[in-house]
Image (cartoon, rainbow, N blue to C red):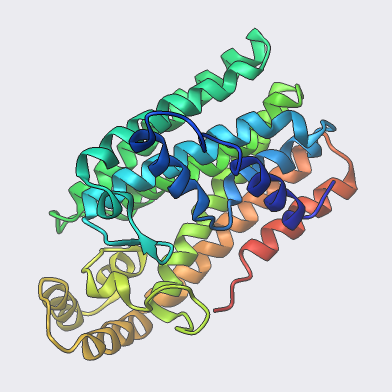
Amino acid sequence: MHSVSYYQEKMKDHFLQIVAQKEPKNLYEPIHYILSLGGKRMRPVLTLMASEVFNSDCEKALPAATAIEVFHNFSLIHDDIMDDAPLRRGHQTVHEKWDLNTGILSGDAMLILAYQFFENYKPDTFQKLAKLFSKTALEVCEGQQYDVDFELRNDVTIPEYLKMIEYKTAVLVGAAMKMGAIVAETSDENANLIYDFGLNLGLAFQLQDDYLDAFGNPETFGKQVGGDIIENKKTYLYLKAMEFANSEAQQQLAHLFASQPTDYQEKITTVTGIFNASGASEATKKAIQEYTFKAFDTLDKMDISPEKKVILKAFGESLMGRNV
């Protein structure tokens, strides 16, 4: 097996060749642009890694890994349109750099392109990949709709929130790993187990993102600390605080999350103080740990060498070790 940086370079080189010279330019240039903005490319890396976990050459998994990353970036273009976001990874979003119609159409083309990459595989593998991909893509859309709906609700429950982040974020992590397993033609049991590994790691990662948004180091987190609080997002931290806090703190929290004060820093300080005092911070850290351990439990059941189990566990630990 190779290092994460090796897989990242492999994907970077591969993406340089995609849709660069295709016509019409106004359809394909935005696709090339969003794919060239980089990022960690963790989802396709997971596909390549999973294929090698099950004794396949990662080159064989490149088309499936590409499909995952193209789909992910398609969803980002449309998310940015829905959020009216001006920036993505420090650069102009597609709909800002071109226009709204281009963002919609280029995004649509990316979804179709993602499916085309599966045509590189024999019929049985193609069918398994396409079936998993269709299920996952629909779940991502459902997760996005839940997220939109929750912005207008004050009665979101913890199970509802966990389902939303599972669909919006974690299923794509699980699918990325299962696609590597499918390409490697391992057993259905192994493929399902590595899906569960990715799914639970994805849940832990998103909960950790919620936590770091409130308590991360601004110099290393990579985005504005307190952004979720400023935007009144009812994350796991907020929901746990509303569950644990006394009535006075609950009312104060509800009031703060229904307002847009001019002094954001004071709001962030007050809210994070309630998160800590109520026990919501500790409950969130505990949930992160539980989902991480749940992911690691699947490794014991996987029919792979002990050395590869160690590699997967080390990868999970590095992913969850963002002390920022």
Looking at the image, which residue is at 37% across and 47% down?
Answer: 76
Looking at the image, which residue is at 56% across and 55% down?
Answer: 291
Q: Is residue 27 visible?
A: yes
Instruction: Between residue 27 and residue 3, name the one nearer to us.
Output: 27
Instruction: Between residue 193 and residue 25, name the one nearer to us.
Output: 25
Picture coordinates of residue 260, whole percent (x, y): 12, 77
Q: Residue furthest top?
A: 123
Q: How many marks?
A: 0
Q: What is the quadrant of the C terminus in the image? A: bottom right
**Residue 104 located left or right of residue 220:** left
Picture coordinates of residue 189, whole percent (x, y): 70, 26
Up the image or down, 126 lies above or below 312; here it is: above
Looking at the image, which residue is at 38% across and 38% down?
Answer: 140
**Residue 2 located left or right of residue 282:** right
Q: Is residue 107 visible?
A: no
Looking at the image, which residue is at 46% across and 80% down?
Answer: 216
Q: Quadrant of residue 67?
A: top right
**Residue 51 located left or right of residue 216:** right
Up the image or down, 9 lies above or below 257; here it is: above
Picture coordinates of residue 229, whole percent (x, y): 27, 74
Q: Quadrant of residue 300?
A: top right
Up the image or down, 3 lies above or below 54; here it is: below
